[in-house]
Each structure stands twice: as structure tokens, then as C-alpha cells.
Image: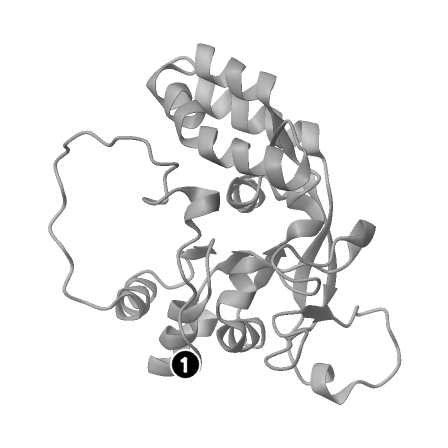
């Protein structure tokens, strides 16, 4: 919204965003002429109360949708965001000491989205870095999951190498898939309620700070905003079992 778009993270996700795997030819759907935020507005308007917005990147398009049509907020079933970090277990950020990548990508948009009057759940590093797909787990998915399992293995090779180099981790953190798991099985997650602000300038730009609803002291910059649900705990084995059963289920 107010700053340059972040550059692609080729050393993490590959030059094509898919770990540099070769993609075969496929039938492409025709391009939609609408900008992404207008597609969101139109879809929500067409299906009031039914649409969950699952955001696994910077939140620019959601903020633009709100600017275009603020009245869509109460029509959205829920917004589930993979992003942020709230200090649970000492996890504070992954691209700076204070910020997670998706939120830092557009902190101004994130602060708008977290302050809008729609139900928001935030699935951040506090739970995604506790959920790890080991190399053996990924190999098992590959061996039993058919074409989908092979794709999961192929697309994660570059990503796993990044984790080995950056965190000495024999596997991968499960970020975006954890947000999907929250939509499908929220009982796997423990949440904390309270409004959330995002710092939009200074050395800690992109930091996500929640005022828990149990905190009694006044905090004017938080108190007039709606509560968000922040994930602070996860049944990691349960999440991994859900993923495994989904990919490896007999078809």
C-alpha cells in the first residue's frame, strides 16, 4: 500500500516459487480481467456469509478490497491469515528479529485487515514453527500419496535445503498448510483473543502485538479495535496426521 513490494525469495522458494521443479504443460483457465481485490469483493457479495478468506501472503489485496467496499467485512465468514509472531516460546520473527515475512511484506495492509470488523484468526510462527515435517515424514508422503505425494516431495526439496542451511533443521516448518489446517480443524489449535496491531515504521516494522482480552489496563491504540484469535498452541501430531490422511487417502 505505501512501500515497494517485496522481492521474490528465490533462495527460499526457488526462482519459480515452486522449488524450481519443472512444470508440465496444462490447460489454463482464462484470465479474469478483474483485479484480485475486486474478485474478492464480487465473490463475497455473491455468497454472503459463506466465504472464508485464506491469506498466505502479504495482505495487500484484502486491504484493497476493504477500501473498495468496506461493507463486505460483515459478509465474510472468516479471515484466516498465515503470518505474524507473538512471542510464544520466544518466537518473534523470521526475516527480522521482530517481524514475520508475510506481515513485513505489507505491514500497513496487515494493520488494516486486523482492525476490520470481520472474524480474524492468525496462524503465526508461534504454531507453524512447532509443526515440522521431517524428511522421513515427507518421504512417507511421497511413497504413499500417489502423484500428490510425489509433488509434495519434489516441491519441498529446495525448501528443505534452505531449512537445513538456515536452521539446521532436518525437515521443513509447516507455515501455509497450518492455516489450511486451522480452517479444516480449528480444534487442533489453542487461541488467545484480543485486538492486534502491526507496527508500520521504525526498526521493528512488521511486528505483530496483541493486547489479550484478559489484560485490564487501558491501551487506546488497541481498545477500539475488534478482537482477533491468535494461535498460541497446536496439536502438531494431529495436524500432521490430518495432512497425511488427506494426501494419502485412497481415491
* Rendering quarter of residue 214: bottom right
Residue 144 % position (x, y): 45, 11
Q: Residue furthest right?
A: 216
User: Where is 148 relative to 194, above or below?
Assistant: above
- Examine the rendering and report whether any part of residue 61 can be seen: yes
Q: Give the residue drawn at x 78%, y 58%.
A: 87
In this view, the residue in front, 221 or 155, is: 155
Q: Quadrant of residue 42?
A: bottom left
Can you say whether 236 is above or below 218 in the image? above
| Residue 90 in the image, given as x and y percentages of width and height | 81, 53
Residue 205 % position (x, y): 62, 74
Quadrant in which the N terminus is drawn: bottom left
**The C terminus lies in which quarter of the figure?**
top left
The image shows residue 20, relative to residue 60, as above or below, that is above
Res. 173 visible in picture: no
* Left or right: where 216 falls relative to 189: right
In the rendered view, would you say 22 is above or below 80? above
Residue nearest the observer in this picture, 76 or 181: 181
Residue 191 screen position, x and y as percent: 72, 53
Which secondary structure lies at badge 1? helix
Q: Is residue 52 left or right of residue 164?
A: left
- In front: 228, or 129? 129
The residue beneath circle 1 is 70
Q: In the picture, residue 63 is in which quadrant?
A: bottom left
In-image side of 126 versus 180 (left or right): right
Q: Image point 77% across, 72% down: which residue?
A: 211
Count of numbered circles on the image: 1
Amino acid at each position: 500500500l505505501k512501500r515497494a513490494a517485496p522481492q521474490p525469495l528465490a533462495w527460499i522458494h526457488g526462482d519459480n516459487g515452486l522449488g524450481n521443479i519443472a512444470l508440465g504443460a496444462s490447460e489454463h483457465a482464462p484470465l479474469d480481467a478483474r483485479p484480485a481485490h475486486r474478485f474478492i469483493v464480487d465473490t463475497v457479495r455473491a455468497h454472503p456469509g459463506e466465504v472464508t478468506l485464506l491469506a498466505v501472503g502479504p495482505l495487500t489485496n484484502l486491504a484493497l478490497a476493504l477500501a473498495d467496499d468496506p461493507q463486505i467485512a460483515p459478509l465474510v465468514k472468516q479471515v484466516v491469515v498465515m503470518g505474524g509472531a507473538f512471542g510464544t516460546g520466544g518466537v518473534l520473527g523470521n526475516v527480522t528479529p521482530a517481524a514475520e515475512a508475510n506481515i513485513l511484506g505489507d505491514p500497513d495492509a496487515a494493520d488494516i485487515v486486523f482492525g476490520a470488523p470481520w472474524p480474524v484468526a492468525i496462524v503465526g510462527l508461534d504454531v507453524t514453527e512447532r509443526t515440522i515435517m521431517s524428511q522421513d515424514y515427507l518421504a512417507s508422503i511421497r511413497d504413499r500419496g500417489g502423484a500428490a505425494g510425489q509433488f509434495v516431495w519434489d516441491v519441498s526439496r529446495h525448501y528443505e535445503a534452505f531449512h537445513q542451511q538456515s536452521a539446521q533443521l532436518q525437515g521443513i516448518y509447516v507455515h501455509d498448510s497450518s492455516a489450511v489446517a486451522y480452517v479444516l480443524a480449528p480444534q487442533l489449535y489453542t487461541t488467545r483473543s484480543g485486538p492486534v496491531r502491526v507496527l508500520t515504521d521504525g526498526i521493528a516494522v512488521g511486528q505483530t502485538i496483541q493486547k489479550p482480552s484478559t489484560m485490564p489496563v487501558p491501551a487506546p491504540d488497541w481498545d477500539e479495535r475488534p478482537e482477533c484469535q491468535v494461535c498460541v498452541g497446536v496439536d502438531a501430531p494431529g495436524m500432521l496426521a490430518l495432512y497425511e490422511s488427506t494426501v494419502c487417502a485412497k481415491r
